[in-house]
Image (cartoon, rainbow, N blue to C red):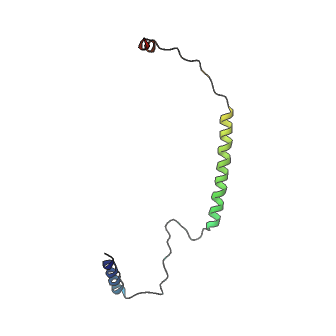
Amino acid sequence: MAMAMVRSGVLRTALRGGSRTSAAPLKRGFASSGHHDDAYETAKWEKITYLGIATCTVLAIYNLSKGHPHHEEPPVSTICIMKNI
């Protein structure tokens, strides 16, 4: 298997016109863009994260500080009483 891979690589190189040792590797451009700085993006998302944490904390305190209604217990159904007999 490995020998077949080496042969196909050698054959491809020979058909393309020899090896190009001076060719620079291509830069990937799928999800990354060349003009953005990683430190800038990291700082931006760190600020967004802290803002999200603060927002969730404030909303949790607000929601948990409000009271909630307590309803009376509903009467026990007669079907449950008959099953217990």
The quadrant of the picture occupied by the C terminus is: top left
Q: What residue is drawn where x is 48% and y is 79%? A: 25
Q: Is residue 64 left or right of residue 27?
A: right
Task: Report how many numbered discs are placed on residues in the image.
Answer: 0
Q: What residue is drawn where x is 54% and y is 17%? A: 74
Q: Is residue 7 above or below residue 49?
A: below
Image-quadrant location for residue 80: top left
Q: Position of residue 19 (x, y in %)?
A: 41, 87
Q: Position of residue 34 (x, y in %)?
A: 57, 71
Residue 19 vs residue 76, the one in the foreground = 76
Residue 45 vs residue 6, the one in the foreground = 6
Image-quadrant location for residue 79: top left
Q: Position of residue 1 (x, y in %)?
A: 31, 75
Image-quadrant location for residue 35: bottom right
Q: Is residue 14 above or below residue 51?
A: below
Q: Is residue 23 above or below residue 70?
A: below
Residue 11 vs residue 27, the one in the foreground = 11
Q: What residue is drawn where x is 64% and y is 27%? A: 68
Q: Is residue 67 above or below residue 84?
A: below
Q: Is residue 81 left or right of residue 67?
A: left
Q: What residue is drawn where x is 59% and y is 18%? A: 72
Q: Position of residue 58 (x, y in %)?
A: 68, 42
| Residue farthest toward the front in the current orientation of the protein | 85
